[in-house]
Image: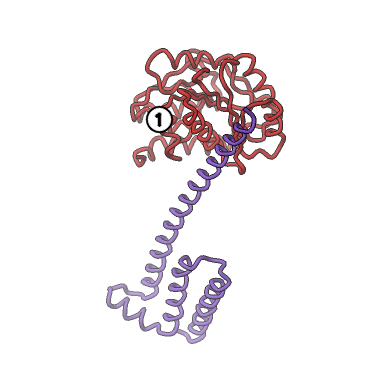
Amino acid sequence: MKDLLIVIPAYNEEKNIGRVITELKEKAGDFPLLAVDDGSTDGTGELLRTMGVKTLRHRVNLGLAEAVRTGMKYALRHGFKYSMQFDADGQHDAAAVNRLYEKAGDGDHDIVIGSRYAEEKGSHSLRTLGGNLISLCIRLVSGERIKDPTSGMRLYDRRVMECFAASSHYSPEPDTLSYLISRGIKVTEVQVSMNERMSGRSYLDITESLRYMFRMCSSILLLQWIRR
Amino acid sequence: MPSVLRILLFVSSLLSFIFVVRRLKKSEVQLYDTTFWITLSALFVLLSLFPRIAIKAAELIGIQSPVNMVFLIIIFFLLGHCFLQSLRFSHLEERFKKLVGEDALKNGEEKQEEDP
């Protein structure tokens, strides 16, 4: 058995998740999958069951961070060395899973980010501007240069998973990343490509994005010193 | 203080006191949560009956207007209460999330035992 568990947090993703699972089975078939159904009210749970994917179900919707945390707890309790967050909306490229896994294996890395801008330059859009701003904040605080801090495709090792399992202060967001770096966690990036969402609306529209940006930057710059 | 205002203050503080006590009796709130509100509303009743207390206390501390002192104290207590509520809310949320997560994990284990 491989020692990487692919965690797929899913909330009302019946339109996308079928294809995501199929692609993962085709292109990253060596790795076991775990879906965390975060209290979906559509056919997501049913679809996962018919596809035979191991699924944990939150009875109520708790949000992405908690779905990822539940997945990590499962990985820890079943002896996995790594877990990877893989979004159910079809953004992430299943073919890149193995590259992140290999990167984690060679060398001293605790977190491997599937990065849109590790080697390639991003276009000048509002989204990349936001990402750059968060990057800048992380650099100011930790000295480390993370080119794609908002990418949700991340691989975590046990050391990091144990932090997540122990405290809800940790979330799969850039501010936690920044905090972990300043605590000596080693982060590296691997170039991946990402698709636009296959279907449905991204949870980040303009005002939502701005609010997110503001929350992340202020959290990175101002709140991290309070953390244990 | 004009007597109409005093009567108004007395009546409204008495009403709010009764309101709090009745809610407590219907046990819509936990006993310990109501101590704060009962004390506060009882204090209002007391102050509306004997405004001299506030005036004397203000003189003693050295605040010119008794009203300012009353406001100051009430705001202080409300902020404190608000902060404690926020703490409790956070704890509750944390425990709730943990519970739902553990429930999902436990159900997952049970399912695994059913179908090997």
- Image vertical order of residue B37 relative to residue A66, above or below: below
Q: Which chain letter goes with mark 1?
A: A
Q: Coloured how?
A: by chain
Q: In the shown orientation, is residue A54 left or right of residue A5?
A: right
Chain seen in purple: B
Question: How many other residues sit within 10 Å of disc 1, few (<14), some (14-19) or many (≥20)?
Answer: many
In the image, A175 versus A21, the foreground residue is A21
> The disc labelled 1 sits on which kind of residue?
Ser
Q: Residue at x 67, y 31 (%)?
A: A13
Q: Is residue A189 visible?
A: yes
- Image vertical order of residue A220 relative to residue A127, above or below: below
Image quadrant holding the N terminus of chain B, namely: bottom left
Q: Position of residue A64 (x, y in %)?
A: 55, 35
- Image vertical order of residue B3 relative to residue B67, above or below: below
Q: Position of residue B69 (x, y in %)?
A: 36, 71
Q: Is residue A205 visible?
A: no
Chain seen in red: A
Image quadrant holding the C terminus of chain B, namely: top right
Please state the total of marks drawn on the protein image: 1
Q: Position of residue A180 (x, y in %)?
A: 38, 30
**Picture quadrant where residue B35 is located:** bottom left
**Picture quadrant where residue A176 is located:** top left
Return the residue found at the far bottom.
B3
In the image, A112 versus B104, the foreground residue is B104
Give SS at disc 1. Answer: helix
Q: Position of residue A3 (x, y in %)?
A: 49, 20
Residue picked out by circle 1: A178
Q: Residue at x 50, y 21 (%)?
A: A4
Q: Residue at x 63, y 33 (%)?
A: B114
Q: In the shown orientation, is residue B92 left or right of residue A55?
A: left
